[in-house]
Amino acid sequence: MKVLILSDIHANLEALESALQQTDYDRIWVLGDLVGYGACPNEVVEAVRRLEPAWIVRGNHDKVCCGLADPDNFTDLARESALWTRDQLTAESREYLRGLPRGPVAEDPWAISHGSPLDEDEYLMTEAQVWMQMTFTPQRICFFGHTHVPILYSRSGRMRQASYVDESMQVRLEADSQYFINPGSIGQPRDGDPRGCLAVLETESASLQLIKFHYPLKKAAQRILQADLPDLLAQRLYIGR
């Protein structure tokens, strides 16, 4: 089975449409944050609904934008975009976001979460955090998002490795190793690369691809400006930060 894994779309319709053209797939897993920052929240929610993901979890922006949580811990920029998104969401989009499950969603040996499996809002930023999470996560392979930085962590016995994804890559997930994998962000990269990033998993062969892709970035940025969202949200797309 070939699984397309998407994370942190953030209302970037152009990036989502381009991501879906990168490969064929049998199923989709979505790691949360469909909305926030970008100018097309309803269009992205509707597109994801049509895809009928086999697995999906909510993100922190999804919770705030649909009214399940307050933006108290958001930056000023994130708060402004979240409140704008609240005003734009249709009733159908809002209810879909409210119905998204809290992570993790799991079936051995796989798991998906937005932040950490222990706390959906926790950013896994350091290797020490990930090694600790591995200790408490029963599934051998966990996909997570939230940081918008594509990276693959692996542990086999005392051997530990963190591999940042600068370019598209393919790896085999070894049966004697445990993995935490962040496929990066579809619509809001934060690794200094404006390209989106996604993952493709072949479950039978345990083969994983991490794919960097271009999308109509200028169009997505223009939508943000036309929506009268903060200019910085458009500028960030060009630098991937």
Image (cartoon, rainbow, N blue to C red):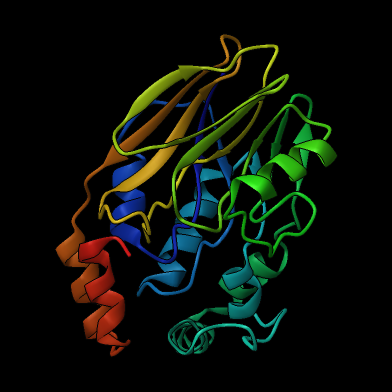
Q: Is residue 115 above or below residue 220?
A: above
Please tell me in which quadrant of the rendered image residue 235 appears: bottom left
**In the rendered view, would you say 199 is above or below 227?**
above
Q: Residue furthest left?
A: 218
The quadrant in which the N terminus is found is: top right
Q: As drawn, is 63 to the left or to the right of 9?
A: right
Residue at horizontal 27 percent and vertical 78 percent from the top: 224
Residue 54 percent location from the top left of the image: 64, 38
Specify whether 2 is left or right of 131: left
- Residue 64 point in image, percent of width and height: 63, 79
The residue at the far front in this view is 158
Q: Nearer the viewer, residue 129 or 207?
A: 129
Q: Nearer the viewer, residue 125 or 96?
A: 125
Q: In the image, what residue occupies the spot 37% across and 72% down?
A: 38
Q: Is residue 6 above or below residue 219?
A: above
Where residue 223 appears, as percent x and y from the top left, is 24, 75
Q: Position of residue 41 (x, y in %)?
A: 44, 71
Tell me the residue at 61%/13% (across/down): 174
Determine which quarter of the picture holds residue 119. bottom right
